[in-house]
Image (spheres, rainbow, N blue to C red):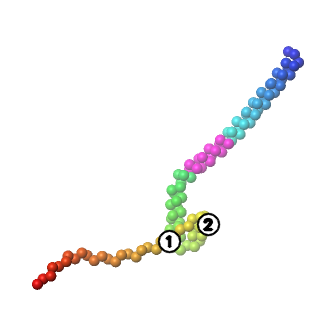
Amino acid sequence: MKAWQFGVTTALGVAALGLVTTEVVLASGNRTLQAEINQRQQYLQQSVQLEGLYREMVRALAERAASSGDDALRDLLAHNGIRYSVDVPAPAPAAALPDVPARKPTR
């Protein structure tokens, strides 16, 4: 093998070794990123499943704060961006009189 052929072959071997090393580093980085993405996706899926439970918990806390007049609980909810209003119940309608059939005048 001539000197220039040896130099070219050695350069190609070094370049191939560099490319393999780069591939290994990039593949490792991709695995790390993929694991992080999978963890985030799992968290989001679990959050969606628990959304109904969280909503009921907040509703119960708001009802408790409204019914007991608990200012600390109201402030805690407000600090977390949850506001509520208390509806005053409408007065009950007066008892309806029973239907009495109209009497015909007697003569």
Across and down, in percent, residue 96 comes to 30, 76
Q: What stretch is highlighted in magenta?
A: 33-46
Name the side, left or right, on which 91 lies relative to 6. Answer: left
- Which residue is pictured at 76% across the width and 30% down the height? 19
Q: Could you tell me which secondary element the residue under label 1 belongs to? A: loop
Name the side, left or right, on which 69 lies relative to 13. Answer: left
Query: Which quarter of the picture shows residue 100?
Result: bottom left
Q: Could you tell me which secondary element the residue under label 2 belongs to? A: helix
Crowd class of label 1 (few under 14; some 14 to 19; many from 20; radius 10 Å): few
Task: Return the residue nearer the eye: 92 or 59.
Answer: 92
Q: Which residue type carries mark 2?
A: His
- Which residue is pictured at 59% across the width and 67% down the height? 78
Contact between marks 1 and 2 (CB within 8 A): the answer is: no
Task: Return the residue nearer the eye: 68 or 89.
Answer: 89
Crowd class of label 2 (few under 14; some 14 to 19; many from 20; radius 10 Å): few
- Is residue 95 rendered magenta in the image? no
Query: Which quarter of the picture shows residue 81?
Result: bottom right
Q: To which residue does mark 2 refer?
A: 79
Across and down, in percent, residue 40 comes to 62, 48
Which quadrant is the C terminus positioned in? bottom left
Q: Distance between the residues labelled 1 and 2?
A: 18 Å
Name the outermost residue toward the bottom: 107
- Which residue is pictured at 53% across the width and 54% down the height? 50
First reached walking from the N terminus: tag 1 or tag 2: 2
Name the side, left or right, on which 3 lies relative to 56. Answer: right
Q: Residue 32 carries which label?
A: none
Task: Return the residue nearer the eye: 104 or 60.
Answer: 104
- Is residue 37 rendered magenta in the image? yes
The overriding secondary structure of the stretch rendered in magenta is helix
